[in-house]
Image (tube, coloured by chain):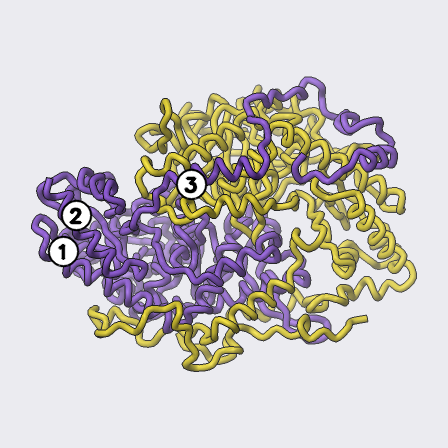
Amino acid sequence: MRDERPMMNESPLIFEQSRPGRRNPAHAPEAPARPVDMPAELLREAPPALPEVSEMQVVRHYTRLSQRNFAIDTQFYPLGSCTMKYNPRACNTLAMLPGFLGRHPLAPVATGQGLLACLFELQEILKTVTGMQGVSLAPMAGAQGEFAGIAMIRAYHDARGDTARREILVPDAAHGTNPATAVMCGYTAREIPTDAQGDVDLEALRAAVGPQTAGLMLTNPSTLGVFERRIIEIAGIVHEAGGLLYYDGANLNAILGKVRPGDMGFDVIHLNLHKTFSTPHGGGGPGAGPVGVGERLLPYLPLPIVAREGETYRWLEESDRPHSIGRLSAFGGNMGVLLRAYVYARLLGREGMERVAEYATLNANYLMARLREAGFEPAFPERRATHEFIITLRRQARELGVNAMDFAKRLLDHGMHAPTTYFPLLVPECFLIEPTETEDKATLDAFAAAMAAIQHEAETRPETVKTAPHTLPVRRLDDVRAARELDLVWEGDEGKP
Amino acid sequence: MPFIPHTEDEVREMLAAIGAPDIEALFDEIPHTLRGADLSAIPAGLGEQAVSRLMRTRAAADRQPLCFLGAGAYEHHIPAAVWEITTRGEYYTAYTPYQAEASQGTLQLLYEYQTMMARLMAMEVSNASLYDGASALAEAVLMAVRANRAAKSRRILMPASVHPRYRQVVQTIVRHQGIELVSLDFDAGQGRLDPDSLPGDPGPCAALVIPQPNFFGCLEQVDALTDWAHRHKMLVIAVVNPLAMALLKPPGQWGARGADIACGEGQPLGVPLASGGPYFGFMCCRRAHMRQMPGRIVGRTIDLDGRTGYSLTLQAREQHIRRSKATSNICTNQGLMVTAATIYMALLGGEGLRRTAAACHDGMGALLHRLADVPGVAQHFTAPAFHETVLRIEGRPVEKVLAAMAEDGLLGGLALAPHYPALADTLLVCVTEARSGEDLDAYVDALRRALAV
């Protein structure tokens, strides 16, 4: 099954290509004419044992490594809740214009008016599209946005002397960052069950709220890929008990331009610009997690925020916002990511934003219909798909001994990245599938065909699926060994520090 | 519509397969009262040409002055190959490597990065990055409290010579976990901590934070400070400039036992100033504390055939497994910036980094030499410096001097008054290898002109 392709099957470390004395004189200054005039005890004895390779070797090595990756630019990537839509190249080019790229963060605001105009307008666009009253672009990732959101809820209750509120409620299907964030803000996380139709259990919620409730964290559509139909009631229950409502914006792509979290009753939200606003995932970051708030939480927004006064822009600081929860980064946040999101928002415009949710939802419902036709089992067959949906492979696991992990690995052999697997935890052997609006019908059909082919293989020669992938640079990796025999740093050349 | 490929025929076919009359029907589970969002405040979409024109005009406002500003973000030469390769679609548009077999490029690169970082810091283990230097310090503080159970303390000693914004960020992030940040004064003449002035009995503390260089560019006496902390059963958190560590003694070699955690801002390693971000935070630690370290970690393993491969490991620390018991809520790292830093470090090598750091220090010395002839300008602190130093200005308020230099097309430094009222007549100036001899002359001329008024 596996063909011998030397390029794909050997990958020495850059360290293994090192030769003592090899240098790149084009990049480092000459050796200084005189010895460094610093006390000897502060100096390093020998330079760090980094690779000694030529520029040609570096370029070849890291270019070849890149070819061992799946990416949106090369493969269909239907990872649920990750929103792997096309990353427009204009966003990259324009965010990296020299005037933005070479600018020091502490340069005078007088020469930063162009940058600040982009950031201010992004704040305004995000306010409008989410229905919130104020936005801060400071958080550097969704998880930092969540932290900011829960910290603001805490600041609000503390300011009112309402310190008995020690609990944050999270649905049992919530993303792991939600309870982790609650704990970081000094709360305990209490889980609320989900019912069989995929909605939060309202009775359980009613029983759980009280004077100890600081707030509820919710994603809508939920992590189960369905719309929380009774959100207005949920908001009422939490608000009546004196708690606040936090919106995890991971699934905003499902409703962008159609429904606004502010209108649903949320008091504070975070967005994931690396999902909904198409900034690149970069192999695991950087992202950006701006927060938006309703009237009550405006004083607490993290700094910095851009303000406009007449024709000029400036940064708001501690003296402007004495009740801010504070700063989350040394400088303003992930500026380059914010600029990419701004360019995307300007390219889309209001009509483009309205179309995002429409076509993301069309694609998800179409794919769900095709997979259903092929005999796969949606987790919530009576529900509409939102921008994503779940199928469960529990029947295949039980009857054929082929599970979701196996299907995922075999999809890689079809040249497609697998959907999200084993999240949310509530649905056994699940695939959370999010095609996004930028994929065409032929791609979706090809995915459905690939799944049908794997199903056939699972029935007729299951070993092929259980030992997949077969056509990638490596076969299935031993994760258990990776955790047990920890090899985190290369020691092959006994590298001296 | 930009980026949506569907033709009308395809939409019809798809709706037929679904069994829905139109796209609107697909939203029928959403209560009607929630529909009808008013987006009229959002401008209409622009074509790429129009957006390009808009952004070019805005970028041009910067005027690209000559930069002598540091204060946590530094201009260095970045070889062209670094971002050519980093912005390849296979790196740029890849996701977190959860399907390891399909992400061996990113995973192997991260393993190489971890190895390079550990060697640069002379520490045993590195993670695959955090968001930035300031939040990395916050995570290090949380980690030290978790790891140093024996101290039974939630107090952290934080020198006032640590970057003011870093101290603010740590405060914001740790405030709800019952952690007390105790400030340590620096010696007003030297501009750094004085080990002889440290308390004989500081009481139980989880850790001492040691910057190197500190915010003023001064070099701390890291051996004495590290040994003092260890004698008093504290962990040592080093917060360092990674480029400086190619020249200066790295945290793993401080004192008798070395620092326990090393963190800081990775921006100097191949990441442009970019108006403030994205940058990346790095964190290294002793093997003994590895399971308390936040963030992603890549490990080397084998596949079914015994072939070497790489995957995310020790995921039991992370939010998607431990949820409310996780070491941190961190999900993303700064993958793209780490890609650039790894390529940068491979291109320069250890000797290249050392020479770059030495050239920065040399440039600082050359500027001070020229400034010796300028009346009203003096070096304020006595401790040795890396590539930044504090200048005391007499004869004209610092803010006005800097404004005049900005008119002349130079960023002359950072006025320290807002963060350090006692240093009201001073500015923090930085010289890197990106500044030529002509640039230094231009600085001196501009400063003279600004003071001559």
Looking at marks 2 and 3 on the same chain, the residue that comes earlier in the sequence is marked by 3
Q: What element carries label 2?
A: helix
In-image side of B330 versus A363 (left or right): left
Say whether marks 1 and 2 touch (CB < 8 Å).
yes
Q: Give me the chain letter of mark 3.
A: B
Q: In this view, does A265 lie above or below A275?
A: above
What type is the residue that disc 3 sits on? Answer: Ala
Would you call the spot at circle 2 few (<14 residues within 10 Å), some (14-19), or many (20 or more)? many
Same-subunit check for callouts 2 and 3: yes
Q: Nearer the viewer, residue A359 or A153?
A: A359
Q: Give me the chain letter of mark 1.
A: B
Q: Distance between the residues labelled 2 and 3?
A: 27 Å
- Answer whether residue A154 is visible to the viewer in this image: no
Q: Is mark 3 on a helix, strand or loop?
A: helix
Would you call the spot at circle 1 few (<14 residues within 10 Å), some (14-19), or many (20 or more)? many
Q: In this view, does A112 lie above or below A450?
A: above
Position of residue A396 measured from the top left corner of the image (x, y, whole percent) = 85, 53
Where is mark 3, residue-wise?
A: B59
Q: The yellow chain is which one?
A: A
In-image side of A293 versus A42 (left or right): right
State the residue at coordinates (75%, 66%). A471
